[in-house]
Amino acid sequence: MDIASLKKIVLFILLFSTANYSFGQSIQLSKNTQVSVLTCGTGNESYSLFGHTAIRVHDTVNGIDVVYNYGAFDFNTPNFVMKFIKGDLQYFAVADSYPDFINQYQYEKRSVYEQELNIPSSLKQKLFDNLNTSLASGESHYTYKFIDKNCTSMVVDIINKTLDTTAIVKNADTDITYRTILYPYFDNHFYEKLGTSIIFGKKVDGLGTQLFLPFELQKSLKKVTFQNHPLAQENKTLLEFENEVPDSWWNNIYTYILFLGFMVLINKKSIDLFYLILIAVMGMFFTFVGFYSSHLELGYNYNILLFNPTLVGLLYFYWTKNKKGIYNLALFNILSLGIYFFVVINKAHFLLVLPLIITNGIILVRMAMQNKKRIPIII
């Protein structure tokens, strides 16, 4: 978020808080107020692949039409990238006028759906007050976690807090893993799918029992009841666009297979070394973020059996011309690769990493054979 946008949001909040009321006085909503959950469609940018969730408060009597969303962050945060990797980047809620909000999604050609909440006026007022208190007090600031704390889970939390019960829970797709749930969102984004598959560890192989995606919340709201009636009304379409298929000559499975095929068929020691060192460097990065980051999704990453950091030792063994060292290291990684195969064979990303398993296996076997000590035959 740039400075200009942040100033605009702060100005809107101040104007909204003071219009026709003294500063700090609570606005009393009319009986005509509508409170709803907005589910925003996916986009082709990395930040928009999973959609977005927000809360709308619309009161025609008081001239209020405001949208609260918990997905804001400041790009000017010092050490932004390292904080994001570390998992202590602060996100926060912002309030924007509904026309500005909807115009942004109109511009981005992303669908927006609305589910009005069937709750009494007193609870609408309570939710409205909770939202404003959250913004004013800083309670809306939170440390982002991909599954455990995001724009969707924060909306669920504040609604449940208002209702004084855990009314909204996940009630669909609880028998499949988080990794499986995520996969459809990566259609036509091959390398994003591959990247998340290899950097995410054991946590995303657990059953997806937590609400963490906007369309999961939308689906769950259809089944939630509160005070013996449905919590949300039927889904209403505010904007609808067909998802545009991104046109990329490189972001597809064909360049992936072509690259790996080239690595196998070229059959040169220098190319084999380059490939395995590249694999090792990626493995070192996965190991680093697994220990450094507080994102639990990145921990216990068994994919380092495929992207094995020990392969960096090849540089030393090649430099010292230690054929025995190369041979033993190749055998160790072949064994690791065999273990990895059986670990992922029942995982959602097995077919995605299978070409890498095959490529690594061929190159490692070739390297072992090239450096195996020949036994002299005495006649």
Image (tube, rainbow, N blue to C red):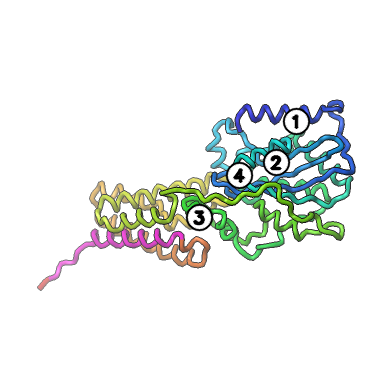
- Where's residue 211, x and y in %? 68, 54
**SS class, disc 4:** loop
Q: What residue does disc 4 label?
A: 109
Q: Of the residues shown, which amino acid type is indicated by label 1?
A: Ile
Residue 370 is a magenta residue: yes
Q: Can you say which quadrant of the picture contains the C terminus?
A: bottom left
Q: What residue does disc 2 label?
A: 69
**Lower position in the chain sequence, tag 3 or tag 1:** 1
Q: What residue does disc 1 label?
A: 13
Which residues lie in the magenta part?
A: 352-377
Mark 4: few/some/many CA within 10 Å (<14, 14-19, 20+)? some
- Where's residue 89, x and y in %? 60, 38
Q: Of the residues shown, which amino acid type is indicated by label 4?
A: Lys
- Where's residue 187, x and y in %? 52, 55
Which residue is most to the bottom? 379
**SS class, disc 3:** helix
Circle 2/circle 4 CB separation < 8 Å: no
Give the CA separation, mark 4 to mark 3: 28 Å
95 up-or-down from 309: above or below: above
Q: What residue does disc 3 label?
A: 197
Mark 2: few/some/many CA within 10 Å (<14, 14-19, 20+)? many
**Lower position in the chain sequence, tag 2 or tag 3:** 2
Q: Is residue 107 left or right of residue 158?
A: left
Residue in view at x 86 percent, y 26 percent: 22
**Lower position in the chain sequence, tag 2 or tag 4:** 2
